[in-house]
Image (cartoon, rainbow, N blue to C red):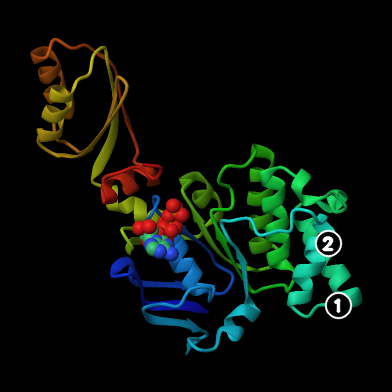
Amino acid sequence: MLETVDLSKSFKGNKAVQNVNLYLDQGESVGLLGPNGAGKSTTISMMSTLLKPTSGEIKLNGANTLGKPDELRKVLGVVPQEIALYQELSAYENLRFFGSIYNLKGQKLEKRIQDALEMVGLKDRQKGIVKTFSGGMKRRINIAAALLHEPEILILDEPTVGIDPQSRNHILETVKNLNKEKGTTILYTSHYMEEVEQLCDRLYIMDHGAVIAAGTKLELLSILSSEDTNKVELNHLDESFIQEVKDMEGISKVEASNLQLKIIAKKGSNLISNLVHLAEKHHVQIVNFHTETPSLEDVFLHLTGRTLRD
Ligand SMILES: Nc1ncnc2c1ncn2[C@@H]1O[C@H](COP(=O)(O)OP(=O)(O)OP(=O)(O)O)[C@@H](O)[C@H]1O
């Protein structure tokens, strides 16, 4: 239903987004994952008509929408990263204002406001002045504002960053209900793998402005089907030890934190005996060792060389 074709954006010659091809089928919930600066917000801003692409196309039901932003705006609801509300007005007054932008009036507007407030769980707080709300409540009102015109597609840009756990759960539930019960198509960007795993049917992983992997969770996990994730705890850990682990045969990635090493290694690569040997050489003790099935975080680490929150 919504598709980008070789979508690119440069800022003064710096390529923020390069040849991004992604699509959303009707009723899907799709995650867009990537570390800071990967190009998620820039991609979303172009898809939401807020930013003009340097090149490429955005197609709605097969037709190019460039030059026809109104067609996209009719079907899209966008929840930006920055909260965009009038702080001195009540939640209800804010929603009346946003509804009027969509030419909603009278009974219809009233019903949409109440439905949207119900959806985000803030019906009983509608008279409250926005500046007195927590960051999470403001974000929920922002989501309600994006729902007033009952969009077929909802795009959310990291809606749970820096908010309280209760609002975070509300937002996750709201997005899930919109998708499962109302059939709203969702594009959800996040740094949090667990949120995307919970909410999304399919994922795109972006890094340095490009999509580096795409697929269902199972498809992405199969990238690491020939490897294991191993966690090793030591009584001492230094750079020379870490470097020698990295140089061992069959090692894809090594990540160190405190006295722990996370090692992604090829199955059957004699990791344990090589590690024991190395530990003896460095007079270091292995305190704990266990092997896990790779997670999507591991796939991300494997593909980008860094963790999602680096
Ligand atoms: N208006 C702008 N002018 C110049 N450079 C920009 C602008 N907007 C984004 N960039 C650059 O484009 C790149 C991609 O940024 P973008 O905000 O799209 O990443 P992101 O994946 O959304 O990151 P975050 O998770 O931090 O929001 C970054 O290098 C950023 O500095």
* Residue at point 45%, 78% (across, down): 52
Helix, strand or loop status at disc 1:
loop
Q: Position of residue 109 (x, y in %)?
A: 84, 72
* Residue at point 31%, 58% (across, down): 208
Q: Position of residue 178 (x, y in %)?
A: 68, 62
What residue is disc 1 on? 105
Q: Position of residue 267 (x, y in %)?
A: 20, 39
Against 63, residue 237 (above or below) is above
Residue 93 bears which disc, if any?
2
* Residue at point 83%, 55% (across, down): 90
Please state which amino acid type lies under the numbered disc 2: Glu
Q: Position of residue 189 (x, y in %)?
A: 50, 57
Could you tell which of marks 1 and 2 lies nearer the N-terminus?
Answer: 2
Q: Quadrant of the C terminus?
A: top left
Residue 136 bears which disc, if any?
none
Please state which amino acid type lies under the numbered disc 1: Lys
State the residue in front, 60 or 224. 60
